[in-house]
Image (tube, helix red, strand yellow):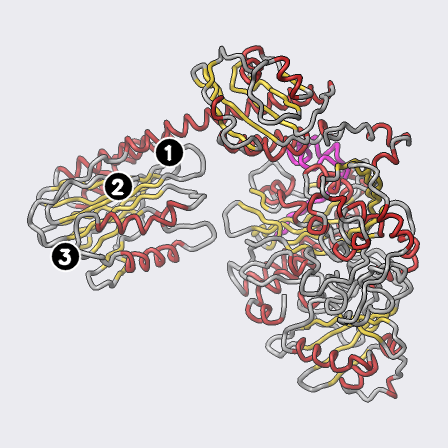
Amino acid sequence: MTGSVEDAHPTAGRLTALLIDASTEAISAGGGHAGGVYLRSRTPGLLRLAVLSGLPGPLFRPWWRLHADRPFPVADAYRLGVQVVLPNATETMRRYPQFAAGLPFQFGSLYVPVVGGSTTYGVLTVLRPAVTDAAEVLAEHDRVVRLAQELGAALRGLEDAHPDQVAWDGEPVCLRPPTASTSLGRAGRFAWDPETADITLDEDLHTLLGMPPSEFSGTVEAFAKAVAPSDAHRILATLRDTALGRPPALPLYLRDEDGALRLLDLWNAYEPPAAPAVRGVVVAPGPGPTADSAADLLPDGVFCVDRLGLVVYANPRAAQLLGRPRAELVGRDLWEAVPWLRRPDFEDHLRAALLTPDPVHFHLVRPSGQDSETGPAAQGAGPPPSAQGTGPPLSARDAGPPPSSPPARSPQSDRDAGSPPSAPGAESPLSARDTGSPPSAQDTRPPPSSQHAASPQSARDAGSPPSARNAGPPPSSQDAGSPLSAQDAGSPPSAQDTRPPPSPQDAESSQRPYDGDWLALSVHSGPDRLTCTVRPASRVKDSPEGQETAELSETGMSPLAPLYRPIALAIALNEAATARQVSAVVMRELLPAFGGRRLAIYLLQERHLYLEWETGFPKGFLSPFDGVDLGTHLPGVETLTTGRPLFFDSMEQLTATYPGIPLDATEGARAFLPLIASGRAVGSCILGFDRPRSFSTEERTVLTALAGLIAHAMEKAQRYESETALARGLQQALLPRRLAAHPQLETTGRYLPGTAGMEVGGDWYDVVESGDGLALVIGDVQGHGVQAAATMGQLRSAVRAFALGDRPPDEVMSSTNHLLTDLDPGLFASCCYIRLDPATGVARAARAGHPPPLLRSPDGRTRVLDLPGGVVLGVDPRARYPVTELQMEPGAILALYTDGLVERPGSDIDEGITALRVALAKAGAPAARPGGRFLAGVADRLTATARHAPDRPDDIALLLATRTDRTEKSPSPPRHTT
């Protein structure tokens, strides 16, 4: 978070800093390699991952949001206030099988609720190596508990100063864990006060610059000249920008007077209300490129990613095998640099490597078209891209904004946490550690390791660099394509730069074709990064370890694919509610796991199969098969009628079995799976493959089992949809089909059901004749479901009966309250009742715990009618409901509504009422003469946003009325609309 954002949102910045500090310290205290903080959100019952340290955020996106009632350890810790210790995968599976199914890896974890006073704010989590028994982590557990208590106390103090601000509604801030590497370079720190122009250097920086304190004049100009004489002007400009709250996104790459590389990182240290001071560190990297030079010569591909997925090193062979130039690999997110790695099985293997200490070995098919970049460009021989073109996409600066703060922040830099870090050991100088106050100039900031410090490429000099803390070692000068070679690391390439020729090894590899479409990968996990080796799959066939996994088919399908997380498919199917959602899950999870390209799902209805979902087939090809009878001689039909799956290794085999069957392709393979749930036929599923292939016994078994899961999910979805249709029909039957009419009053109503589940709601509205006037009624029964709908029907009938008897509004409300109390359904209801005389415009209103109505005057002024009222119906049988008299002018619009139209999770209902009042003021202006469809158009405009919203947590009722001067009969009685 930059200074300007920090000033604009001081609470958000302080909250983020507290969470970052707690997460970072908890990982160290708990002996973990990753962790984070879940925080409550402004949506009731929803937890959000606020900070994630040591893991790529996008790779763990399914765990960003978590409902407090889910069977997960985080939810239990938050909801029950208990500390959860899971020492290993066995205990995790025993206690939390659904959580273990999503992350079926051998690791342990700690979950401690963050409590301040009587308020639970969230959960502090640590992921750590697995141990045999929970007793082995008692000491670490106790340390994490203390940190959670300290965080809870700090959050309580923050909330006392800024109520309702300790919540998280954005994406998680992703940051790197404290480095465990030992620095081989040197570093020193300094502080500059722009108001007094005083600059103070610590002892280490004096030593690094070779300038004793007695020889230092104490001016910022002298400091800039000592750091990098040729770039002094650049240093001064950056210092001034930082003083204005605009610190550089990445460290500056500079050269001292001898041409040696130096890194300068700057940040703000805030001491409100004073202007931000400037803190910084100067790093002289150690001799790190030696190992890279050796790795560049290896015949196998080697690349490294940090724990946020940023590629920090790649040798020429890795660039060739991955099909990307080195300049497009290093400093970029792995999935951005190599898009074809964005596939479920690879991501699953990468999660395993990130969470467990053991190496992970697997095979991947390299998509066709990736073998084009085999020339020198693929080896990184070209010039580096500009800084504007690329950047470290997974830096925490881009990982997501804190609550109520649109700009993103960089949690790993100290300037984001409010003050620079002060930590022992070998902590990276760019890690986000906040001690609560800015350190003095004498505070030490340990330098980064040579692997970290020497590697990053300057944002201005070398293209798309990572930060000085997370980038890997720079490629050696032997690599002609290195973005940071020994000759140009300190300055951008000029227009006269020429592309150097590739090394002999690069030239040889560029002329050598790939050994096959399959690649064998091994991922070795470290505390700071993952080292990956990649080689053509044919080179490991003869090894004992490779024989098991190198049996590759000709179809682009790994033998590991049948084992790819069938439990994950089951979990995803369990979340799907409709048939189309089930089909989408099958397409997303099943096809990639088995290498399929085509999918069709047919559902059985009255002895005919109807197409529910298709993907990958030529447009219109499946139309003739939609609605086929069960007696048709087709594989998709016979697989269901016989209950046996049908597998065809080639299209020739398919046509030999079913002569004359139309084909969508001349080559490929097909699998026809029966969808049968508990002996009941549901439909059939067709999987299509682009090339001929054989189905092993194991594959057939797994596909058949998964077809059973799909069938059960489809059956549940069909039942859900039929019950939903029934519930919607019941809801419509309980609403009035026709509203009472009057020549001098136009009314219209709208009802929108909620989207959360199939249960009917309890909202209703009505217009009833009452003496020589009309009664306008709107109400809302608590909850959803059959009981709420039944209670709503009873109340609507009771109010209607009392209104037809022309009773005063207070008697109508009191009588209805007595009735609901006597019925004792265990529910309460809100209601607003207004008896209006259309001829005079006199209205008498009573309200029982219902949102206040709105009245728009003919001149456009719209106000909230703050009617005094009583408690909700069904609570107190002796409750009284005062009556308020109103005057409604001709052309005025009266709006009655339920809370679903104005209430949103995380916002105050008064804000929603204000927004509705403004909308009514704008929408209520008649475009032409009043009457006719004028009021219907107003109702449509007021409900347009809710109507098109993908998620409506509650149902909505709206009733509008307007007086007219007309005495003639209205054209036709209005009907309600849903």
Residue type pointed to by label 2: Tyr
Q: Nearer the viewer, residue 463 or 734?
A: 463
Question: Residue visible at 51% across and 58% down?
Answer: 164
Q: Vertical placement of 609 versus 939: above or below?
A: above
For disc 3, the marked residue is 890
Q: Position of residue 490 (x, y in %)?
A: 81, 71
Q: Position of residue 222 (x, y in %)?
A: 80, 86
For disc 1, the marked residue is 760
The crowding category of the residue bearing disc 1, from other C-alpha atoms within 10 Å (few below 14, some 14 to 19, many at least 20), is many
Q: Vertical placement of 74 versus 177: above or below?
A: above
For disc 2, the marked residue is 765
In magenta stretch: residue 606: no
Q: Vertical placement of 426 versus 777: above or below?
A: below
Q: Secondary structure at mark 1?
A: loop
Q: Secondary structure at mark 2?
A: strand
Disc 1/disc 2 C-alpha distance (Å): 15 Å
In magenta stretch: residue 94: yes
Region of the chain picked out in magenta, as a range:
86-115
Mark with earlier residue (2, 3)? 2
Q: Residue furthest left?
A: 967
* Image depth: mark 2 or mark 3 in front: 3
Residue type pointed to by label 3: Pro
